[in-house]
Image (cartoon, rainbow, N blue to C red):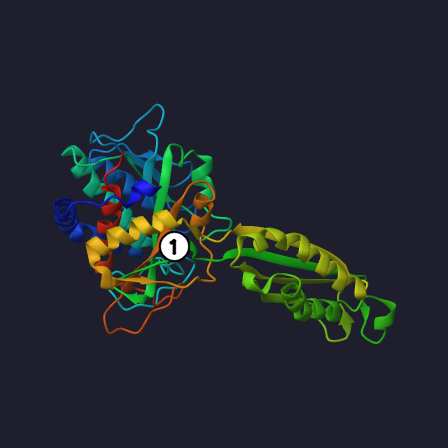
Amino acid sequence: MQRTLARVSESLHAQAAAKAAAFADELVAFRRDLHMNPELGREEFRTTGLVRERLVRAGLAPRLLPGTGVVCDIGPDGRGATSGRPQQDMIAFRGDIDALPVEDVKDVSYRSTVPGRAHACGHDAHTAIVLGTGLVLAELAREGLLPRPVRLIFQPAEEKLPGGALDVIKAGGLDGVGEIHAIHCDPKVEVGRVGLRAGAITSACDRVVITVSGPGGHTARPHRTTDLVTALAKIAAELPGAFSRRIDPRSGASLVWGRIESGSAPNVIPQHGELEGTLRCLDLEAWRQAPDLMHELVDALASTYGAKWELEHHRGVPPVVNDPDAVAAMRAVAVDVLGASEVEGTEQSLGGEDFSWFLEQIPGQLTRLGVRPPGHPPYDLHQGSFDIDERAIGVGVRLFAGLALRPYR
């Protein structure tokens, strides 16, 4: 990917910026419409329809993914691919389109109209950015200024494990794609700035469910049965520590419980109990080793109390591992578009992100996009109060357009 460092001329950046500015009000309105009408993963039928309709009006030929989601190609000749073999070595831009089962508590005109649903992670902005990128690049392609084919991916179900990225891959959404880029809103970073990181930028995230069982009995005679609650409590208390001592501490593995259930009366030893939580891991190899190690440790702890056990280790997502060359390309574009002072490093997060599945297939990178209004305390993701400075939409469009416009041979 060394060729990705070729620079875009100032005049081409200026043309892309002018076109992005012309769409700015429309994209803000589009984002607000999505914000008012959030849809959960694999239920994004309205969002899919709106995206498709706008791409068609732009003269493109979007195709629907099975269920929900859209893929749309833009060729250097100004036309979208409609059939036949996909053009090779395209650059792709991904926007996730689903919302969260969270109540919107903001007092704004575009507050969610759907009870218990909100775009509390910025996916509405991601969708608007990829749409805006497509509108800008379609015009530039018609003017003969697009050097390589582009694919827009509007992906469903990012918030569902193991993620809608796998749906896109299964449907051939990466066929012919040579590199892929995404952005994610970062409420800690001020609008107009971006955070970049080569290597792992997010964590692996799995769901773990442990079920224990026994014959049950009276609390007066625990020695005649399986003291199930004690067994479950011991697993909950000791498994995270035992796991951390059997895996490289540099892997950043974190096993945390969110639910524990057993019993219904104070003098009855129950027959069933459940423990559920998440395993997050910063290192890809440690993530791959985790299921076998978890089974070994649960067996040792449960057998001490004579409890039968089952472990459901639901694979979520691996870490997002950014390709260094792709990050270097984004850095060069960001410096040209925003200025060197607006580009900063970013830490690896323990959050999960299914963009990782794309990077298991092809090189690419995820950028953290500043969305915090100047002087405003940071919002947090996955909370009903989350919002963005909408000027970030135009920033994202200009960055993606700059990546697509790099000279390519």
Pick whichever, 169 or 247, lies toward us: 247
Residue 46 shown left or right of residue 394 in the figure: right
In which quadrant of the rendered view does residue 117 lie?
Answer: bottom left
Point 63% across, 61% down: residue = 247
Secondary element under disc 1, as helix, strand or loop, is loop
Residue 151 shown left or right of residue 208 in the figure: left
Percent from the top left, x then y, of residue 180? 36, 43
Residue of label 1: 99
Q: Is residue 47 above or below residue 125?
A: above
Point 22% across, 35% down: residue = 147
The quadrant of the picture occupied by the C terminus is top left
In which quadrant of the rendered view does residue 5 lie?
Answer: top left
Q: Amino acid at mark 1?
A: Ala
Percent from the top left, x then y, of residue 235? 70, 66
The quadrant of the picture occupied by the N terminus is top left
Residue 132 shown left or right of residue 302 in the figure: left
Q: Residue furthest right?
A: 224
Percent from the top left, x then y, of residue 379? 34, 69
